[in-house]
Image (cartoon, grey):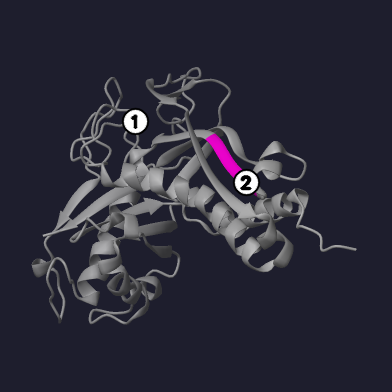
Amino acid sequence: MGAEVLSSRAVIGMFYEELQAAMAASWVSRVGMQFNSGQDVETYPWLGMTPAMREWVGSRQAKGFISNAIEVRNKHYEATIQFLLKDLRRDKTGQVRVRIGELAERAVTHWASLVSTLILNGGATACYDGQYFFDTDHADPGADYTTSQSNSVSVDISALPAQVHGAVTAPSVEEMAQSILNGVSTIQGFLDDRGEPVNETAKAFLVQVPTSLYQVAVNALAQPLAAGAGVQAASPDLRIEVANNPRLNTWTDKFAVFRTDGRQKSFILQEETGVTLKAKAEGSEFEFDNDAHQYGIDSWRNVAYGQWRHATLITMI
């Protein structure tokens, strides 16, 4: 009996197993809210905030919503790999599983690529309120509370109380820790369109840094500081993670902080069709003509800015 070629059914099974694991490990789902789409373009009405409770005086006083809409158009993306039959025959699970695992990772890191582009362009691209996503003068037109708020913050690290001072491209651990806390406290202090605190229950945050700032950011969360303890020890009720995002490596003196435990998120992840793996495999004309199999993934998806109140850009000056 001749040696059997690894079947397309087995390869497809490997792929979806790897895809599930890769998505669970990604930072994307912590800053993005995923929506299923059923058409070419979806409209998201950002309807303001739910009112706070008030003393019942007279009758109920219903509050309407501030309506700002954003449209997201789906785009078609794909990636395809090819295996020679001899490789499938000789390597049942080794290199084939590696390549299939990499294809699954590409499906997930594609989300990271799309969202990272939004992060990089956030200081020059408008979100649902008409202001840049990272901006110094966010306000909701027609709201009860119209005072502008800033989620683009400059921190003068030379003015921070620290025993050791560094440069904006190489801050000291103390300076980085206080800059991170500045971003966290900024998010916690945002008010909604009625002047009520909107993030007062926020406890979980993700700090997105370029590679050059990753080590000092990790140390800032862990090491003792001159004025007390490290960020996590000083605020044990907070859960702060650091993500090294090499897609942000054009940044040298800035990083972004995101709330991750809110009902809304900073970004919209829109998907019309989930990632689908298709095969030209056993019995196909492609196999007959090329003595090979092809496996391709594709998805209709796109991303957009979501809730700016759950994000802050910190620029060290």
In this rendering, the answer to whether 27 lies above or below 151 is below
Q: Which residue is mark 2?
A: 295
Q: Considering the numbered disc 1 on the image, is that residue within a helix, a strand or a loop?
A: loop
In this rendering, the answer to whether 16 lies above or below 286 is below
Q: Which residue is mark 1?
A: 194
Give the mark, 1 or 2, whose residue is nearer the N terminus: 1
Q: Position of residue 246 (x, y in %)?
A: 33, 60
Q: Position of residue 317 (x, y in %)?
A: 10, 60
Residue 207 in the magenta stretch? The answer is: no
Question: Which amino acid, mark 1?
Answer: Arg
Specify whether 142 is left or right of 13.
left
Q: Main secondary structure of the magenta part?
A: strand
Specify whether 261 is left or right of 258.
right
Q: Position of residue 271 (x, y in %)?
A: 54, 34
Specify whether 220 is left or right of 253.
right
Task: State which quadrant residue 129 falls in.
Answer: top left
Query: What residue is at 39 percent from the left and 71 percent from the top?
Result: 232
- Magenta span of residues: 293-299
Q: Nearer the viewer, residue 266 or 62?
A: 266
Mark 1 to mark 2: distance in Å?
52 Å
Query: What residue is at 65 percent from the left and 50 percent from the top?
Result: 292
Question: Which amino acid, mark 2?
Answer: Tyr
Which mark is on residue 115?
none
